[in-house]
Image: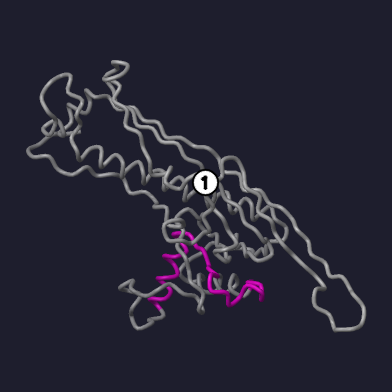
Amino acid sequence: SLYAGEAGAYIGAAVKSGKTIADGQITILEGIKYKKTLTIVSSSSLIRDADCDFTDGTLTLTDRALEPTDKKLNLSLCATDLEQDWQAAQMAAGANNSNMAGDFPAFMMEYLGAQVGDNIETQIWTDMVTNLTADTNVVDVVGATLSATNIVAEMQKVYDAVPASVYGQDDLRIYVGTNAVRFYIQAMSTLGYLNAYYAGDVPLLFEGVEVVHCPGLAADTMVASRVSNIFWGTDLQSDATTFKVLDQRESSGANEIRIAANFSSGVQHAVGGDVVLYS
């Protein structure tokens, strides 16, 4: 770190934001201390031609567990290092003064919050794809290496594979990773739709279905699902944005400042047959 003249702004490395949760593109379940059971209902032969008999239909209940994983963030910062940084100009005088400059804690909360968001975003789609791959009821579409020249044709495969019972639902989405959304926008720009895609001010749609950019989704992977059919579970959503700043100079005497956070995160889907996995 360098000090030169007046203090400037702290700059954090760019990280993938937690877009899937922030944009409301997954169903959130809170209050899960250990695990939550999702009850999936299926039926057959419920509706028949009327006659004089009582002919029983079939209603089947199956369970799928959503079990969040406990996670933590721990970070120790040496107070001496902070004092040698340019922010020392904003700190009160005195070797025993524990007051950090106001902009540094604000930066750390924003930066560490982004790190947590990045971790959750990546974990959501890593675990989701793992679960979908293991579910034999999921509609599988064989993927390819995506590019701007084939993205429309490959997305068409996903679109065509959407089950008839799911097609037309208001919360149906096509989830794509960063490379796919870039290729799709490039393709739309090449097609020249009102030249609007050059400005990036057009909602992403594929034949009427909303296309959702998920930074945590792996390259060359796409998922089509209803928002109401995929779940992210946690104990309390705000845990992921709550940090404790512990000044050890006032407790243990160590010349350091500790930052800690604890949260939980887990994903699950409900009806596998209503989901399309392109991979």
Determine whether 40 is above or below 115 in the image.
Answer: below
**Residue sitting nearer the eye, 266 or 115:** 266
Q: Residue at x 58, y 77 (%)?
A: 168
Color encoding of the figure: one colour
Magenta stretch: residue 61 in it? no
32 is higher (above) or lower (below) than 190? above
Of the pair 5 and 75, the residue shown nearer to us: 75
Dot 1 falls on a residue whose secondary structure is loop
Residue 116 coordinates in the image, percent (x, y): 41, 43
- In the picture, measured across the screen, residue 35 lies left or right of residue 208, that is right
The x, y position of residue 161, in whole percent, is 64, 72
Residue wearing tag 1? 234
Q: Is residue 30 left or right of residue 140?
A: left
Q: Quadrant of residue 203?
A: bottom left
- Indicate the amino acid at tag 1: Thr
Task: Point out the residue furthest to the right here.
Answer: 53
At which x and y percent is residue 38? 65, 54
Which residue is outermost to the top?
253
User: Which x, y percent locates residue 212?
Assistant: 47, 65
Pick the residue in front: 173 or 192.
173
Q: Is residue 213 left or right of residue 274?
A: left
In this rendering, the answer to whether 87 lies above or below 163 is: above
- Specify whether residue 186 is painted magenta: yes
The residue drawn where x is 69% and y is 64% is 273
Give the residues drawn in magenta, as a range. 161-190
Using a 10 Å C-alpha cutoff, classify the residue at mark 1 as few (fewer than 14 neighbours), some (14 to 19) or many (20 or more): many
**Which image quarter is the N terminus in?**
top left
Q: Quadrant of the C terminus?
A: bottom right
Q: Quadrant of residue 78?
A: top left
Closest to the observer: 52 or 72? 52
